[in-house]
Amino acid sequence: MIQDLIIAGFGGQGIMSIGKILALAGMLDDKNVTWFPSYGAEMRGGTANCTVIVSDRAIGSPIVARPWAAIVMNQPSLEKFAPLVKEGGVLLINSSLAGNKIETPMNLRFTKENENTQRGFTDERKDIETIRIPATEMADKLGSVKVANIIALAAFCAKTEIVSIGSLEKAMERSFSSKDAALLRINRLAAYSGREHILVNK
Amino acid sequence: MTNDFNNKRLMIGNDALCEGAVQAGCQCYFGYPITPQNEVPAYMSWRIPQVGGIFLQAESELAAINMVFGAAAVGARAMTSSSSPGISLKQEGISYLAGAELPCVIVNIMRGGPGLGNIAGSQGDYFQATRGGGHGDYRTICLAPGSVQEMMDLTREAFDLADRYRIPTLILSDGILGQMMEPVIFSNDLNLFDDLPEKDWALTGAKGRPPRVIKSLYMGEGELEERNWRLHDKHKRIEMEIPRCEYLNTEDAEFCLIAFGTAARVARSVVYLAEKEGINLGLLRPITLYPFPKRPIKELARKGVRFLVIEMNLGQMLEDCQLAVNGVTDVFFYGRPGGGIFNPEEILKVVKSYL
Amino acid sequence: MRPVFVRPNALKNVPFRFCPGCHHGIIHRLVAEAIDHFGILDRTIGIAPVGCAVFAYDYFSCDILEVAHGRPPAACTGIKRARPDLIVFSYQGDGDLASIGTAEIIHAANRGENITVIFVNNANYGMTGGQMAPTTLLGQKTKTTPKGRSASSDGYPLKVCEMLATLEGTTYIERVAVNNPGHTKEAGRAIKKAFKVQLENKGFSLIEALASCPTNWEMSPAQANMWIEEKMLKVFPLGIYKDTSETKI
């Protein structure tokens, strides 16, 4: 099985970090994994995205045009990536910042770049499974909006079982433990609440 | 983020490459900043001093390659890295290194060209990397990693090959392989170099022996021709001894993709897609670009296999494939130039059009 | 009988093939005397540049590396960083050091590389037949300045010692000449000093030696020596431009 997903949001939302944590968790599960960032001029500010692939087989292309899943943390990412998710795939939306009001700003509406994604975009795609989670609000309640990314990741993993819970926890530990204990604690809390959100709303 | 787990570590390609160099006992790194290879000097700046090596940020690409020239001349294992425009600048030094028969490792994390191009991954430097690159009649060994693991392993091996043949050895990779992260397994067996020849040519001070000269100028009558014949013999030996490629699904495929590096990764996805549709599609991935693995391609061609060459350029390795096939069967081509990257679905469509 | 004048050990027993009256032979000898003086022949690496001095590998009896045009300071850096126990000198002309290799010399100097540079300034490109060099004097006729070098189109003679002396990284900078016995004696002292600075790990030293090129200047050797005295010394005054060797630890 090859599971490929795109994670996208604003720069500073910790998009790259959760991508790396997911890849690391996949590695700890003894899967083949690839993490690929969108790199370049767009890195500073604006949207950030990365691709993560978790697979039993040797992984081919690190770049995926039509992913199996997407985690979108803001409105521009929703508009860009929701239409690209393959039929039968999974879309996780940070509903605090995306998907409530679908209105493309005038200045974006007619640019060539947006043409294709705009055309295919509907808020409710019936052919994929959509998960909405108010990750930023939940994170705010926990004490830091910065952990919205972990909430989203944990929810996504709970829903899809792409990696084991144990590996995800271990991956988080390895990513945060060197920094400080408080950081690890709040991220653990975030992971717990993200997972809870899915289990409770099943 | 570096994490050890059963000798496995999740790393980006550029960092893994540095670890390969460190494993090979690289003693000196000289480089100059350019995207998308900036992780290499950044990593080396702290990593190589840990093992007693030298890191120096040079004032230019020219200086960097000539620092490598100096360090290689005194017998040190030395490396430099850059991306396409910087590699063009280094060509002068590479020609001198080849002429002076000095071993070293040069890394090209390719970006789009010509000129300043862009910073997206590309394979536009294939000709430059496999035809010598600088002035004069020479070749350099050229290795093309296809994964983060190979970024490490082939870099380690590059030092070995460079020393064995006294030749500059290139790692030809690209921005995508350099930036992406995959698990790498650290080998415990690092003693790959037992059978390497002594560096009995290195400039170490003329103590108890006649003075040595390392040069590329041969003004005497017939001297240069003799020298070039010697280089030619060496190239022939390399072409006999080290061509290498990876096969996927080629046993009974009648149609086969040929691709290297990142393009080969995309090609692998194409093979998977074809499999789902019941299409028997093979993939041959050259790992050494110079020497090019002509024989395996020739053998498939003799069996009647037809080929589609895929490159992130507009047809460079294609020419080597055509030379190998030599008109025996069809060689088709699909590529996108600097900055563009194809996806597996689009290539599968092309494949089907030839079936 | 005790010989009073012998060939230094650091020179091979072969005759120089430089043009009559050329100063390269004298400067080679002074470098060789310095190597002998310190007894470092078996751990010295010399750099042969591009230009008339490329044949340094035929004359010096230490190990020699021939390096691309202008790049000797970078190659010296590579050698010295890899093997700090070796003594490294580059021997470069004015085209090599002050034109195509300006970046390399400035940055090696600025890093304070522990190397010795012998910079031979003969105010033109000798090997290629006498074209304008960065050090060509204003009004001086060369193959590429048939009416004489003009400041408005070609700029001014580049003063390497003055320039490098401003860099914090440099330790010892001196300009010398070998156009008469007195100057030559001073030059020998300066070159020894430059090697001493390196031997004491005190950093970057450069000796600029004004040199004649009678063939391309179209003068007799004697006239060339006079031309140095009367013309070159005015633009390129001799002397120590920098010496921090006593204060450097």
Image: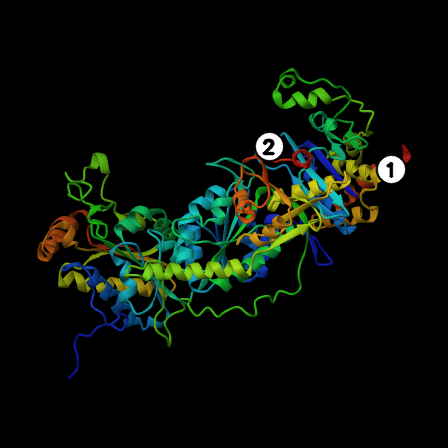
Q: In the figure, B6 relative to B261: above or below?
A: below
**Nearer to the camera, B80 or B276:** B276
Q: Few, some or many C-alpha atoms within 10 Å of disc 2 (few <14, some 14-19, many ≥20)?
A: few
Quick one: SS at disc 2? helix
**Rendered image quadrant of residue B120:** top right
Q: Amino acid at mark 2?
A: Glu
Q: Position of residue C203 (x, y in %)?
A: 37, 59
Question: Is residue A60 left or right of C238 when viewed as pictured?
Answer: right
Residue B105 visible: yes
Question: Of callouts 2 and 1, which one flags the residue occurring earlier in the amino acid sequence?
Answer: 2
Mark 2–mark 1 distance (CA, rounded to whole Å): 34 Å
Mark 1 = which residue?
A: A196
**Rendered image quadrant of residue A2:** top right
State how the image is colored: rainbow
Q: Few, some or many C-alpha atoms within 10 Å of disc 1 (few <14, some 14-19, many ≥20)?
A: some
Mark 2 = which residue?
A: A42
Q: Amino acid at mark 1?
A: Glu
Q: Position of residue B229 (x, y in %)?
A: 39, 60
Quick one: SS at disc 1? helix
**Nearer to the camera, B271 or B93:** B271
Label 1 is found on which chain of the structure?
Answer: A
Residue A181 visible: no
Contact check, label 2 and label 1, Cβ < 8 Å: no
Question: Is residue C152 left or right of B265 when viewed as pictured?
Answer: left
Asked if badge 2 and badge 1 are on a common chain, one would say yes
Q: In the figure, B48 relative to A166: above or below?
A: below
